[in-house]
Amino acid sequence: MTDRRLFTRKLDIARGAVDMTHGSGGKAMAQLVRELFAAAFANPYLDQGNDQAAFDVPGGRMVMTTDGFVVSPLFFPGGDIGSLAVHGTVNDVAMAGAVPLHLTAGFIIEEGFPLADLKRVVDSMAAAAREAGVAIVSGDTKVVERGKGDGIFITTTGIGMVPPGVAPSGDRARPGDSILVSGTMGDHGVAIMSTRDNLGFETAILSDSAALNGLVAAMVAAVPDVHVLRDPTRGGLATTLNEIAHQSGVGMRLRESDIPVRAQVAAACELLGLDPLYAANEGKLIAICAEEECDRLLSVMRDHPLGRDAARIGCVVEDPHRFVQMETRFGGRRIVDWLTGEQLPRIC
């Protein structure tokens, strides 16, 4: 029997754009999925062509997370919405100490979105998934009318398996524990700021967007009983530490001089009247561990390419008020409070 696809004109990636038929469930949608998404994300699960993926998993504890990505602009220094969607979801799985296995992806695309930009996003997403060692095994595509979206939104779900004896959680920080970060704070937030027309400044800072599962695997192999792992995304380091302090019922003492921040990030934040501790990160993590494990864990982190700038920035203390406090460079002390309002919307 003749394959009718042989008589279908291929997608004009260079000059074409998404239209409403690409979300109708008919031939145009099937062609978009086949020639763009399935071609980029090809793997045995996706190739089955079902509306779901069935697979075996090893015995043990499973982790599952879901996240939506609406970053603006879609393409920014050091990344784009496609790679960010993979990195953000892989990292949420990894913060449970888990090994990410598979992802699913849902796309909301605005009518008129250039196919060339869609291919760029999809190819970036596929490359990020391959680098992270995960497969995008199922997905969905919807198209909305022109003016009813903003180019493209992506929703991803990830699953992973937790190795035996590993159980980091935000409620496990204990007085005396050490607080570590894997690198410089605020890079992603400033990279996004630098591309917003109305902010009017330039910087060489790239987003730190990266998949942290390799770093986490090395960390939990060396210190299985790491108490807390968390990636400080929206709200930055300051808000994330407040979240953990409230979950665990403890206080925290930080040293400003020990918190790594790039000079360009600090300068950009000063220009805009912002605090880099509240700026978003997409390729950094916070680790809290017993004091006796600190040097060992820090060494492992610094041996990994994504942790070479890792630092111990403070400790967990008893405090019924659950305050996060910081010893400033000038010898004083101030409260590092939750983020109030929104420093910069749509950073992920």
Image: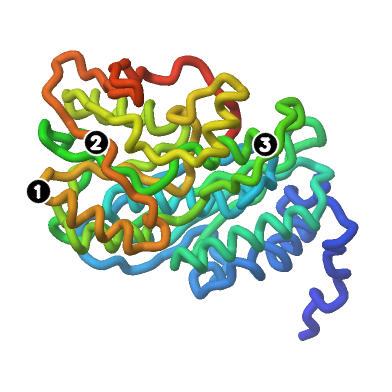
Q: Nearer the viewer, residue 143 or 1?
A: 143
Pick whichever of labels 2 and 3 is earlier in the sequence.
Answer: 2
Mark 3 to mark 1 CA distance (whole Å): 41 Å
Pick whichever of labels 2 and 1 is earlier in the sequence.
Answer: 2
| Amino acid under disc 2 | Gly
Residue located 40% across and 37% down the image: 232
Q: Judging from the image, what secondary structure is the residue with disc 2 in?
A: loop
Q: Residue pushed farthest bottom?
A: 1
Left or right of 178 in this view: 57: right
- As drawn, the label of residue 194 is 3
Q: Quadrant of residue 26?
A: bottom right
Residue under label 1, please give it. 292
- As drawn, the label of residue 146 is none
Mark 2 to mark 3 CA distance (whole Å): 32 Å
Which mark is nearer the camera, 2 or 1?
1
* Residue 251 image offset from top left, x and y in percent: 19, 23
Q: Quadrant of residue 108?
A: top right
Q: Nearer the viewer, residue 206 or 20?
A: 206
Q: Residues within 10 Å of mark 1 (few under 14, many from 20)?
A: few
| Amino acid under disc 1 | Glu
